[in-house]
Amino acid sequence: MMDFTGKSILVADDEQGIRDLLRFTLEPIGFEVSTAADGVEALRAVEARGFDLVILDVHMPRLSGPEVLAKIREIRPRQKVLVVSSSSDASLSFEQRVAEYGATSCLFKPVELDELLGTIERALVQGGNVT
């Protein structure tokens, strides 16, 4: 596993338990973790600073994940964004739609932590599409 020390990540999810789980998983391996409870908070955080990676839930209040992603693409076109969906639509067409919005990758809940960490590492190392 690569060294994540000093890498910043935004976890945007309306479920406090998910935000806490990811914070407690990612901070010990070196990430500086910021969190957002809804789409507006996520967008404000990205506007305020750049992150090495954004983990973005699809279904959030105020602004949905895809709406946030579209706005992120306007203000930070090179921002790496990993979309995590709680949608039951775990289909190729959904993944393609998310990729069209500019996501680096798409994972479906419940996400295995090993799978998430591997996807994060590929996103940061490759810097491109890792779906």
Image (cartoon, rainbow, N blue to C red):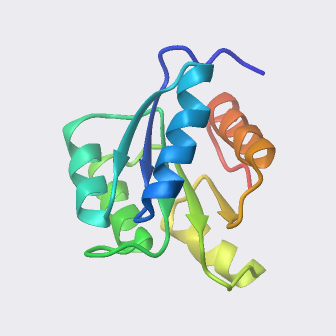
Tally of numbered tags = 0
Q: Is residue 20 above or below residue 43?
A: above
Percent x, y of residue 82: 57, 53
Q: Is residue 120 above or below residue 91?
A: above
Percent x, y of residue 95: 68, 73
Which residue occupies 62% across, 21% down? 29
Image side of residue 108 versus residue 114, left or right = left
Image side of residue 17 versus residue 62, left or right = right
Between residue 38 and residue 93, name the one nearer to us.
38
Percent x, y of residue 51: 40, 34
Q: Is residue 70 above or below residue 35?
A: below
Image side of residue 49 versus residue 125, left or right = left
Q: Which quarter of the figure is the C terminus placed in?
A: bottom right
Image side of residue 76 versus residue 16, left or right = left
Between residue 47 and residue 8, name the one nearer to us.
8
The quarter of the picture where residue 127 lies is: top right
The quarter of the picture where residue 91 lies is: bottom right
Which residue occupies 35% across, 65% down? 68
Q: Is residue 119 above or below residue 29?
A: below
Q: Which quarter of the figure is the N terminus placed in?
A: top right
Percent x, y of residue 72: 34, 55
Which residue occupies 30% across, 73% down? 63
Which residue occupies 47% across, 32% down? 52
